[in-house]
Image (tube, rainbow, N blue to C red):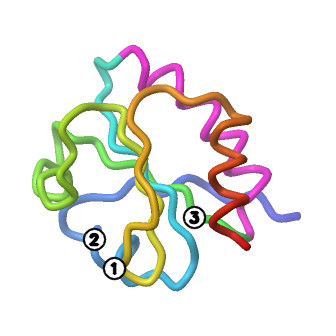
Amino acid sequence: MEQMTIQYVTDQNFDDVVMKSGKLVLVDFYADWCGPCRMLSPVLNEINNEYGDQVTVAKVNVDENPKAAIQQQVMSIPTLKFVKNGKVLGTSVGFKSKEQLKNMLNSLLV
């Protein structure tokens, strides 16, 4: 299986990478100074390695890309959004374990 890399998304390419994707996109809205965001990072790397062919994992730094965060009504971080074909299928706020994220992804990949 080919190693997929996590995509870092900006205000400029958010629509192209996330909203126009026909594949399920797991978007992590984070900031470098956020403790729970840093805890979530290795979990997302594992999810990316396991689901890379089915799910695009994308990260948006809210300090550098406030427009995307405002557009997606992100109030606190980390916020995870599950998006496919321009529709937000789910939102998760705060740290989640790998098992919790896998359960959410598996329910959306049916």
Residue 49 included in the magenta stretch of the image = yes
Looking at the rendered structure, the secondary structure element under dot 2 is loop
Q: Is residue 94 above or below residue 27?
A: above
Q: Is residue 75 above or below residue 6?
A: above
Residue at 29% across / 18% down in the picture? 33
Separation of marks 1 and 2 at Cα, in angstroms: 5 Å
Q: Position of residue 71 (x, y in %)?
A: 14, 61
Q: Quadrant of residue 17?
A: bottom left
Q: Position of residue 67 (x, y in %)?
A: 11, 56
Which part of the image, by quadrant, shows the N terminus? bottom right
The mark nearer the N terminus, 3 or 2, is 2
Separation of marks 3 and 2 at Cα, in angstroms: 14 Å
Which part of the image, by quadrant, shows the C terminus? bottom right
Separation of marks 1 and 3 at Cα, in angstroms: 13 Å
Q: Position of residue 92 (x, y in %)?
A: 43, 43
Question: Looking at the picture, which amino acid does disc 1 mark?
Answer: Asp
Question: Looking at the picture, which amino acid does disc 3 mark?
Answer: Thr
The mark nearer the N terminus, 1 or 3, is 1
- The dominant secondary structure in magenta is helix
Q: Which mark is residue 56?
A: 3
From the viewer's perspective, tell me whether residue 107 is left or right of residue 17.
right
